[in-house]
Image (cartoon, coloured by chain):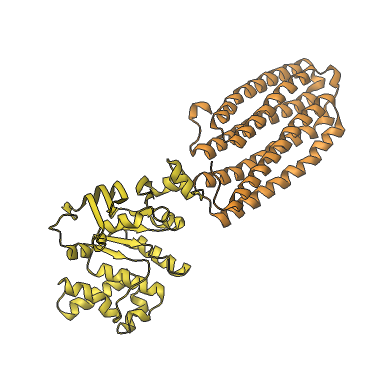
């Protein structure tokens, strides 16, 4: 797209996109490290994930302020307006994704008998998939690529399938080993959080599609 | 109401408007937008043949007003301009009283002969233009003594007084402060439905606020025409998008 005649407008939009990219990068790391800490039982790393979430929250506030400022001072139209509205909503969604990672990290110390708890080994693959969705949707955002956004949306079904599989696995584990119910219940929440991250990445993908094209993705994609 | 078909305007050999077709209607306010020199004012001036006053200008194509071809030789231009009124960028009241500014048109067009009839037209026109309450006690003051915004509403009242079908507005608020501008915009909203209104404006925010249809002109062509909300949210043409988002040029 051509540059704005008013250069400061371009700078504002670039800054807004930079903030979203930064938030997204931190959210990706948070997912990976939360799962890493969960699988290895590394409470120190878990605490770090929890602490770093504050940075994501602060960035969301920055996005809100800048978006409102752009609307007030630049009166954006068409693609620009959709871009700013999308950024506002995407920042809110990434903040939620950060919260889910934080929630996973908080549960690190609540799992007992890690070495013998095989359902734990299923989580990293699911986490990778969810993290990949977040990564891809931000790439789609950066490139204003509605096709990649639609691919992200179609990936969500795989995350859901993981969740169902892990859910069944954990339930049968609980039935067979009642002593692990507490830990298994914690892991259910972890899997649930990852499933929610996938849903939120899907929502971001819909906003990216809207910002790029002015329309929402077709219903069959969702 | 008015149908323009394949209208081209030439200034000498130079084509200023290139085969533009559009319908205008009292059902919606139509805004013409585009960069300076794109031909939007030239095109607007075709609707009441204001371009006739420019010797080198010639117009081809057809423009119908309720089925009458207004570009034909048999069209009485004075009558046409009563049916298609115009409001200009700078308020241009006659250097006469407020009352006479309004009464002049109806008198020469024979719409009213007796004083009470004229009085009624003056009151009705000023009321519709949202000016009656402000000037009813000083109808004998000069029109030029009013503020800029009041003068512009006086000019709108003057256009309304001859009971036109169409009102053309060429940058009607660009010389006014924001409050006076808001009053003009509110007035446009109130008048639409009764009259077909076409407004040329450089302010895209104004086009977005007052119109329901927008036509974007560039280099003499109508690049895109459609519902105002579509044009400003998701235009189809890249040139439209670049212009309204401030990327033109």
The quarter of the rendered structure image containing the N terminus of chain A is top right
Q: Position of residue A150 (x, y in %)?
A: 55, 28
Of residue B83 and residue B75, the one placed in the foreground of this image is B75
In the picture, one chain is orange; tell me its letter.
A
Residue B78 place in picture, x, y as percent = 18, 66
Whether residue B194 is visible, yes or no, is no
- The residue positioned 16% from the left and 74% from the top of the image is B112
Report whether B204 appears left or right of B25: right
Quick check: A65 above or below B234?
below
User: On the picture, is A115 further left or further right than B53?
Assistant: right
The total of numbered circles placed on residues is 0
Q: In this rendering, is residue B100 above or below A85?
A: below
Residue pushed farthest top?
Answer: A176
From the image, state the color of chain B. Answer: yellow
Left of B146 or right of it: where is A191?
A: right
The residue nearer to you, when weighing B209 against B64, is B64
What percent of the width, then of the height, locates residue A25? 71, 36
Q: Tell me: residue A91, above or below residue B48.
A: above
Identity of the residue drawn at 75% across and 22% down: A124
Q: Is residue A159 visible?
A: yes
Residue visible at 60% across and 48% down in the picture:
A10
């Amino acid at each position: 797209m051509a540059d704005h005649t008013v250069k400061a407008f371009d700078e504002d939009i670039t800054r807004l996109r930079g903030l979203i990219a930064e938030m997204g990068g931190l959210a990706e790391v948070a997912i990976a490290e939360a799962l890493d800490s969960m699988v290895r039982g590394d409470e120190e790393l878990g605490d770090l994930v929890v602490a770093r979430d504050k940075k994501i929250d602060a960035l969301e506030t920055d996005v809100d302020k800048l978006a409102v400022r752009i609307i007030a001072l630049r009166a954006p139209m068409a693609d620009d307006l959709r871009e700013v509205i999308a950024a506002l909503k995407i920042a809110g969604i990434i903040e939620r994704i950060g919260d889910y990672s934080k929630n996973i990290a908080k549960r690190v110390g609540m799992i007992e008998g890690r070495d013998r708890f095989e359902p734990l080994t299923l989580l990293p693959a699911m986490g990778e998939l969810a993290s990949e969705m977040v990564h891809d949707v931000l790439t789609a955002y950066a490139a204003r690529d509605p096709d990649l956004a639609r691919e992200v949306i179609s990936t969500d079904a795989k995350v859901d399938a993981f969740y169902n599989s892990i859910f069944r696995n954990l339930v049968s584990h609980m039935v067979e080993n009642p002593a692990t119910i507490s830990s298994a219940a914690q892991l259910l929440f972890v899997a649930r959080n990852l499933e929610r991250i996938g849903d939120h990445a899907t929502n971001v993908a819909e906003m990216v599609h809207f910002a790029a094209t002015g329309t929402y993705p077709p219903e069959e994609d969702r | 109401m008015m149908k323009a078909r394949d209208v081209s305007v030439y200034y000498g050999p130079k084509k200023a408007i290139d085969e533009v077709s559009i319908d205008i209607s009292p059902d919606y306010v139509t805004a013409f937008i585009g960069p300076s020199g794109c031909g939007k004012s030239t095109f607007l001036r075709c609707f009441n043949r204001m371009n006739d006053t420019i010797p080198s200008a010639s117009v081809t194509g057809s423009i119908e007003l309720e089925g009458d071809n207004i570009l034909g030789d048999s069209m009485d231009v004075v009558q046409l301009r009563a049916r298609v009124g115009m409001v200009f960028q700078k308020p241009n009241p006659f250097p006469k009283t407020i009352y006479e500014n309004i009464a002049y048109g109806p008198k020469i067009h024979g719409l009213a002969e007796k004083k009470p009839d004229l009085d009624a037209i003056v009151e009705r026109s000023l009321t519709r233009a949202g000016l009656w309450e402000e000037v009813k006690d000083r109808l004998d003051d000069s029109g030029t003594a009013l503020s800029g915004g009041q003068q512009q509403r006086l000019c709108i009242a003057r256009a309304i007084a001859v009971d036109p079908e169409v009102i053309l507005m060429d940058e009607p608020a660009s010389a006014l402060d924001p409050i006076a501008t808001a009053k003009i915009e509110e007035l446009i909203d109130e008048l639409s439905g009764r009259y077909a209104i076409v407004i040329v404006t450089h302010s895209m925010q104004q086009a977005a606020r007052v119109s329901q249809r927008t036509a974007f002109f560039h280099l003499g062509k109508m690049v895109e025409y459609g519902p105002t909300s579509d044009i400003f949210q998701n235009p189809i043409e890249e040139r439209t998008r670049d212009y309204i988002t401030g990327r033109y040029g």
